[in-house]
Image: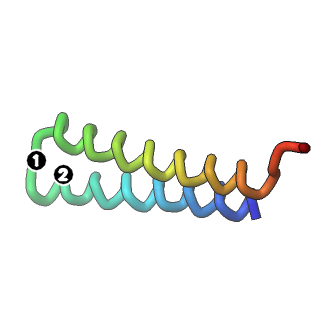
């Protein structure tokens, strides 16, 4: 389960970054706005993957 969560998080990061690149090229948005959104969404995906990994391997009592 942990590997699946990590794989999903990496795929989400890749898709979001590609979508933001297309938006930046089509709408000519500020690179700072695109970069900020990309970093924020990446942190969310990484946090979700971390939570899935921790949930899959609980600490011994």
Q: Residue 19 in the image: x percent, y percent? A: 31, 61
Q: Which residue is mark 1?
A: 29
- 18 relative position to 3: left or right: left
Q: Is residue 6 above or below residue 33?
A: below
- 9 relative position to 58: left or right: left
The residue shown at (37%, 52%) is 17
Q: Which numbered tag is attached to residue 57?
A: none
For disc 1, the neighbor class at 10 Å (few under 14, some 14 to 19, many from 20) is: few
Q: Which is nearer the eye, 31 or 25?
A: 31
Q: Residue 22 in the image: x percent, y percent? A: 25, 59
Q: Report the Cα–Cα distance between label 2 and label 1.
A: 5 Å
Which comes before the other along the chain, label 2 or label 1? Answer: 2
Looking at the rendered structure, the secondary structure element under dot 1 is: loop
Give the residue furthest to the top.
Answer: 32
Q: Residue 18 in the image: x percent, y percent? A: 36, 57
Quadrant assignment for the N terminus: bottom right
Q: Which residue is mark 2?
A: 24
Q: Residue 2 in the image: x percent, y percent? A: 74, 58
In the rendered view, how is the structure colored? rainbow
Q: Which is nearer the eye, 29 or 39?
A: 39
């Amino acid at each position: 389960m942990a590997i699946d969560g990590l794989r999903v998080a990496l795929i989400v990061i890749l898709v979001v970054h590609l979508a933001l690149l297309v938006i930046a090229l089509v709408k000519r948005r500020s690179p700072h706005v695109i970069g900020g959104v990309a970093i924020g969404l990446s942190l969310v995906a990484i946090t979700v993957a971390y939570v899935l990994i921790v949930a899959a391997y609980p600490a011994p009592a």
